[in-house]
Image: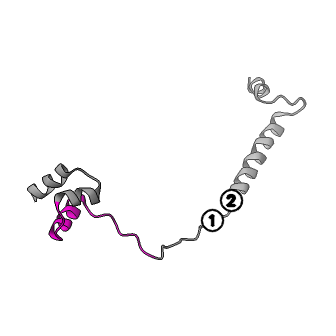
């Protein structure tokens, strides 16, 4: 039974069960050796000359511009949003 199952997986004629096991073992050992030889690459890190500042919250931007004297129309234009959106922020602030 074991030999008949072995024949299902091995098509080489004249290869006995012991030789078949040796084929599997040597293939597995070679695969492990190859995996262990692959070097780990650590790419260099690059930092920007000018650090990127995170974008301010929309509400914070609206309020800051309003305190600087900009109108709702000017704020909406600068922040690329509707005047109504700017007015809502100012109303609930």
State which quarter of the image contains the C terminus. Answer: bottom left
Residue behind mark 2: 36
Picture quadrant where residue 24 is located = top right
Question: Residue 66's quadrant in the figure?
Answer: bottom left
Q: Secondary structure at mark 1?
A: loop
Which is nearer the N-term, disc 2 or disc 1?
2
Considering only vertical position in the picture, is 34 above or below 7? below
Magenta segment: 50-71
Task: Please say if 90 is above or below 52.
Answer: above
Query: As rendered, which of 72 and 8 lies closer to the eye?
Result: 72
Expressed as whole percent of the image width and height from the top left, the position of residue 15 reads 87, 34
Name the residue rendered at 18%, 65% in the picture.
Answer: 70
Look at the image and tell me in which quarter the N terminus lies.
top right
Where residue 13 sits in the image (x, y, percent)?
89, 29
Is 89 placed left or right of 78 in the picture? left
Where is 54 relative to 84, above or below? below
> Residue 59 colored magenta?
yes
Q: Which residue is mark 1?
A: 41
Give the residue furthest to the bottom.
Answer: 49
Q: Residues within 10 Å of mark 1 (few under 14, many from 20)?
A: few
């Amino acid at each position: 039974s074991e030999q008949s199952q072995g024949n299902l997986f091995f098509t080489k004629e004249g290869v006995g069960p012991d030789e078949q096991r040796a084929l599997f073992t040597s293939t597995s050992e070679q695969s492990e050796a190859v995996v262990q030889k692959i070097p780990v690459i650590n790419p260099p890190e690059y930092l920007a000359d000018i650090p990127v500042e995170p974008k301010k919250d929309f509400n914070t931007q609206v309020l800051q511009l309003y305190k600087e004297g900009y109108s709702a129309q000017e704020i909406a234009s600068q922040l690329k949003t509707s005047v109504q959106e700017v007015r809502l922020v100012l109303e609930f602030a």
